[in-house]
Amino acid sequence: MPGVNQDQSDKDSEPFVEIDPTGRYGRYSELLGSGAVKKVYRAFDQEEGIEVAWNQVKLRNFSNDPSMIDRLYSEVRLLRSLTNKNIISLYNVWRDEEHNTLNFITEVCTSGNLREYRKKHRQVSIKALKKWSKQILKGLDYFHTHDPCIIHRDLNCSNVFVNGNTGQVKIGDLGMAAIVGKSHSAHSILGTPEFMAPELYEEHYTELIDIYSFGMCLLEMVTLEIPYSECENVAKIYKKVSSGVRPQAMSKVRDEDVKAFIERCLAQPRSRPSAAELLKDPFFYEVVDDDDDGDDENA
């Protein structure tokens, strides 16, 4: 088969800079994105012949807390068992002892994250924004009704990914997810300040913090502005969030139905609806469901 010829003189071939322990996945040098503790590289699945994402977490960031490393590893392993079309698939995970990294392979979306995609395509109908929103909520509903319950804890537009040729949207960057089981309660403070619910700062919260973050995502989708961008630092964001002051971007939302829907998501925890409840909201009545035959994706 000519396809398996690995002639090193072929100038068009791109060399791997790293290969996983199984020999299946090869990493390229091209960086797709990076965060505080993680870098994401373009990679290739030699068995399936598809491009994937190679996520690398430097464990030295958690060197003062070995239990955090174990927890991160066990949570990522659990996430590998999740199957939902609105959640980025996790294919493999392993720890590299020599380089002190945690590595995991995920699917890659053609059009990058929703923040970049929305900036690139500025003329988008409310109908399209609703389609994206509905898919994000379906992913959250899967997390929140899973046994054990999973809280994403860092939902924002840079953690939602898009296949631009189909309009499919998937939640990714699950490295901060908390598995909370029957208690539905978590305690550690982490996330992206602009998208963090007020109760998250109080270190006692449930999966409804993801609904708050979703509301902020929708606000960003509508206004093309990161919430609380008027604040100079995290302390000022915290002060506004904890005192219930909405971001200035809310004043830019002209559609009253959209504004009311966002407000539902940002409500106090006791009156904040679940993902399942929001999916039944009249806000989505005009959005054709895509569960069965993919009609929504081709609309």
Image (cartoon, rainbow, N blue to C red):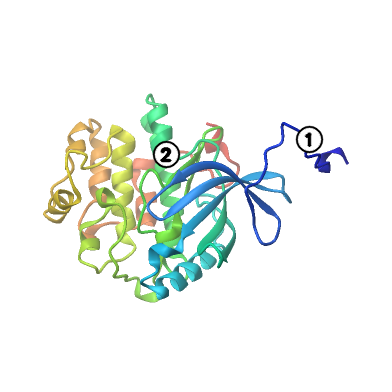
Query: Which kind of residue does numbered mark 1 sit on?
Result: Ser
Left/right placement of residue 287 relative to residue 262 reads right
**Along the line of sight, the residue nearer the viewer: 59 or 83:** 59
Report the residue marked by disc 1. Answer: 9
Residue 147: x %, y % from top left: 47, 70
Residue 148 seen anywhere in this rendered image of the structure: no
The secondary structure type at the circle numbered 1 is loop
Q: Residue furthest top?
A: 123
Residue displayed at 67% across by 38% down? 14
Q: Residue at x 55, y 58 (%)?
A: 104
As drawn, the label of residue 131 is none
> 153 and 281: which one is in front?
153
Give the foreground label among 2 and 1.
1
Residue 163 in the figure: left or right of residue 218: right
Residue under the point 35% across and 59% down: 153
Which quadrant does the N terminus fall into? Answer: top right
The three-letter amino acid code for the residue at tag 2 is: Leu
Could you say whether the residue bearing mark 2 is in a helix, strand or loop? helix
Which of these two is toward me, 198 or 98? 98
Number of the label disc, if any, that sits on residue 114: 2
Q: Indicate left or right for 25 with 277 as reference.
A: right
